[in-house]
Image (spheres, coloured by chain):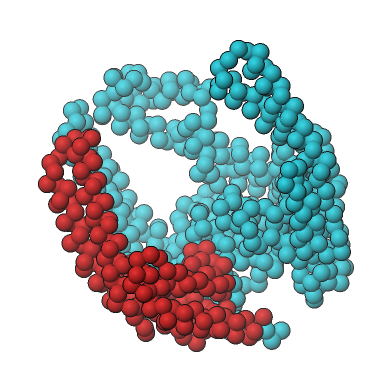
Chain colours: A red, B cyan
């Protein structure tokens, strides 16, 4: 099974850093407007969240896997709740390639696969080099059309 | 009609916004009303619909004109609703849905009853004729549907009592202000012997007496919600009838507001058989079906349509098989360690409540009943057992079935050829016990209420096996469909 590009850890890490900053700011706001708990707690909150972010991001990267099999796209992910997904090509409605601002700086893209389902209506494969993302996008499109011709 | 209301509302807004002399407000109201009525009349006069050989055309709009053509074979559901007021005037609202889009595609606001029924059956016929399904395009399916089921009054009574609507709790809480006084005095008089408060005011309420009040109030609220729910159910399902018209099932129901809808059988994604705890010993069950028509985000009740609100279990299964032939499921139970998991979960919940209560009792004066949640500790193993007992899965030749729920046991039957994405998921607690949850996603399932069909807490290896198996069965089912 294929792993994501290692640079995806930077994107996830930055997102984690942002949530750590938000946690710290939250404590600052509580301290200033509700009841004073001491400024040092803000730093503590930031450090606690941030110290979780690093191992979480590393584990998340290590677990993330995907593979194109005979009839379906398989994905494996999740640190706390491990999820395995099979998206049959016959069920793919359309495929998107997405690039956020940070991902663009790092030369990464995401591929989003849409189905008509309810819970798994969109499945994202993040952190792919742009060439890899385009190749995956094209391959999925081909496979979807092939399977349509088989099944309809 | 709606336009008039809008105008009146605009006028009323004028009152609050301008705060000027009454005459201006009056003029504004009148102008708003006239404009609203004018808009309504113009909308009515400029609205035009037509059935062509293969499309349903609607031209509408006062300021922005819009012309919409929907091919018959793309129409999924055609529903007719008649509110009480509209029944008096003999008119109805007809709506048509397609598989895509976020809202109802066509709405005809005022059509006569006869016209609505005619449109409903004609569209159904033409849909079949224009290639919705070539094999049945013979047109021999008559105009009037053959009746399959009619709800008897005993069934309606059981339905009203056995199906408690969660929404009724809100109505009971907020919707009945005029019985509030009565309810309050009843509540206080029942709670007083157990240490409830003398009167309902925040100052007189000690934490202990508030807790007692809540304990007494809970069941009272439940009973009143139950009554409300039963009344709503009777009004909604009175005179329920189900019939078959060619490839579609048609139903009508309602005491005050008549509602008539269609279930396109070839678009059925899954079947759900529901057996509430009160209906089970009497041998009753209900059947609802999920079609891919209604878009997510619409009123959730309409996504899953009731084919049989309630009837004998055998009758329900007979009709369910008529829609989608499946063998009687023999359910495989979950491993015993799943039961242990539920037991641990309930213990943790009760323990957590006691812990929070204890902490609060340290800070709140007069709060001594923190240990009260311990009362339910003896029944946690029983609860865990029943939760475990009613869960199971069945892997059939053409279908997979999942069962869950003690209070409202639901059995969901999913044909392999309707499967979309298949998931397995394992939380850290599940991994510790070697358990997994297998989800079989289908198109437009009732995501709010029931969620996607899933087997919870099955053995981890079994989940892997089923995960692969469901994928294979989907491919095989699609290939065999191609052969036919």
Quadrant occupied by the C terminus of chain B: bottom right
B438 shown above or below B372: below
Asked whether residue B147 is in view, the answer is: no
Describe residue A143's horizontal placement relative to residue B83 as left or right.
Answer: left
B21 shown above or below A73: above
**Where residue B268 sits: x, y (%)?**
65, 65
Q: Quadrant of residue A105?
A: bottom left
Describe residue B80's horizontal placement relative to residue A35 as left or right.
Answer: right
Question: Which residue extends farthest front?
Answer: A105
Q: Quadrant of residue B293?
A: bottom right
The residue depicted at 70 percent of the width and 68 percent of the height is B266
The residue depicted at 17 percent of the width and 48 percent of the height is A42
The residue depicted at 67 percent of the width and 57 percent of the height is B307
Asked whether residue B37 is in view, the answer is: yes
The residue depicted at 49 percent of the width and 37 percent of the height is B170
In front of the other: A84 or B168: A84
B435 shown above or below A34: below
Quadrant occupied by the N terminus of chain B: top right
In front of the other: A114 or B427: A114
> In the rendered picture of this protein, how many numbered marks are placed on residues?
0
**Where residue B87 sits: x, y (%)?**
78, 37
Describe residue B375's horizontal placement relative to residue B253 as left or right.
Answer: left
**Where residue B258 sits: x, y (%)?**
73, 43
**Where residue A115 sits: x, y (%)?**
54, 70
């Amino acid at each position: 099974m294929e792993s994501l590009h290692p640079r995806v850890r930077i994107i996830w890490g930055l997102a984690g850093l942002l949530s750590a900053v938000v946690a710290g700011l939250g404590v600052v706001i509580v301290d200033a407007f509700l009841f004073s708990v001491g400024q040092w707690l803000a730093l503590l909150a930031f450090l606690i969240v941030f110290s979780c972010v690093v191992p979480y991001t590393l584990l998340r990267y290590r677990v993330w896997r995907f593979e194109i099999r005979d009839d379906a796209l398989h994905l494996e992910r999740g640190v706390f709740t491990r999820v395995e997904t099979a998206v049959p090509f016959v069920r793919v409605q359309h495929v998107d390639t997405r690039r956020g601002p940070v991902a663009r700086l790092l030369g990464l893209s995401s591929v989003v696969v849409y189905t008509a389902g309810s819970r798994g209506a969109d499945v994202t494969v993040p952190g792919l080099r742009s060439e890899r993302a385009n190749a995956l996008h094209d391959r999925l499109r081909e496979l979807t059309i092939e399977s349509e011709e088989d099944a309809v | 009609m709606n336009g008039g209301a809008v105008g009146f509302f605009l006028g009323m807004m004028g009152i609050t916004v301008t705060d000027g002399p009454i005459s201006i407000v009056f003029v504004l109201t009148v102008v708003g009303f006239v404009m609203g009525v004018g808009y309504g009349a113009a909308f009515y006069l400029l609205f035009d619909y037509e059935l062509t050989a293969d499309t349903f055309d609607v031209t509408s709009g006062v300021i922005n004109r819009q012309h919409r053509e929907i091919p018959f074979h793309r129409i999924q559901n055609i529903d007719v609703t008649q509110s009480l007021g509209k029944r008096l005037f003999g008119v109805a609202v007809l709506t048509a849905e397609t598989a895509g889009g976020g809202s109802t595609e066509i709405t005809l606001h005022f059509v006569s009853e006869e016209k609505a029924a005619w449109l409903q059956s004609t569209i159904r016929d033409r849909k079949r004729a224009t290639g919705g399904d070539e094999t049945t395009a013979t047109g021999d399916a008559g105009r009037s549907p053959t009746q399959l089921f009619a709800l008897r009054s005993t069934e309606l009574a059981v339905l009203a009592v056995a199906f408690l609507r969660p929404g009724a709790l809100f109505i009971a809480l907020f919707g009945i202000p005029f019985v509030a006084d009565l309810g309050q005095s009843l509540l206080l008089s029942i709670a007083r012997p157990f240490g409830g408060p003398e009167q309902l005011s925040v100052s007189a309420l000690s934490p202990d007496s508030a807790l007692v009040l809540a304990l007494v109030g809970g069941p009272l609220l439940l009973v009143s919600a139950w009554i409300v729910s039963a009344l709503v159910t009777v009004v909604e399902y009175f005179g329920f009838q189900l019939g078959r018209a060619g490839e579609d099932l048609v139903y009508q129901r309602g005491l005050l507001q008549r509602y008539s809808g269609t279930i396109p059988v070839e678009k059925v994604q899954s079947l759900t058989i529901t057996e509430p705890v009160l209906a089970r010993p009497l041998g009753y069950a209900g059947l609802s079906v999920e079609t891919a028509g209604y878009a997510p985000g619409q009123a959730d009740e309409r996504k899953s349509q009731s084919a049989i609100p309630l009837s004998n279990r055998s009758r329900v299964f007979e009709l369910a098989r008529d829609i989608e032939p499946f063998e009687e499921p023999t359910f495989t139970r979950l491993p015993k360690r799943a039961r242990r998991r539920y037991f641990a979960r309930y213990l943790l919940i009760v323990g957590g409540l006691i812990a929070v209560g204890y902490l609060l009792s340290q800070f709140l004066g007069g709060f001594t009943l923190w240990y009260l949640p311990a009362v339910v500790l003896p029944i946690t193993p029983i609860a865990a057992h029943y939760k475990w007992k009613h869960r199971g899965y069945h892997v059939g030749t053409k279908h997979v079935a999942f069962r869950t729920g003690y209070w409202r046991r639901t059995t969901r039957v999913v044909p392999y050829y309707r499967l979309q994405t298949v998931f397995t998921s394992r939380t850290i607690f599940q991994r510790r016990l070697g358990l997994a949850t297998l989800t079989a996603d289908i198109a437009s399932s009732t995501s709010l209420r029931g969620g996607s069909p899933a087997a919870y807490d099955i053995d981890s290896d079994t989940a892997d096996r089923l995960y692969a198996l469901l994928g294979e069965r989907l491919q095989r089912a699609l290939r065999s469909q191609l052969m036919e």
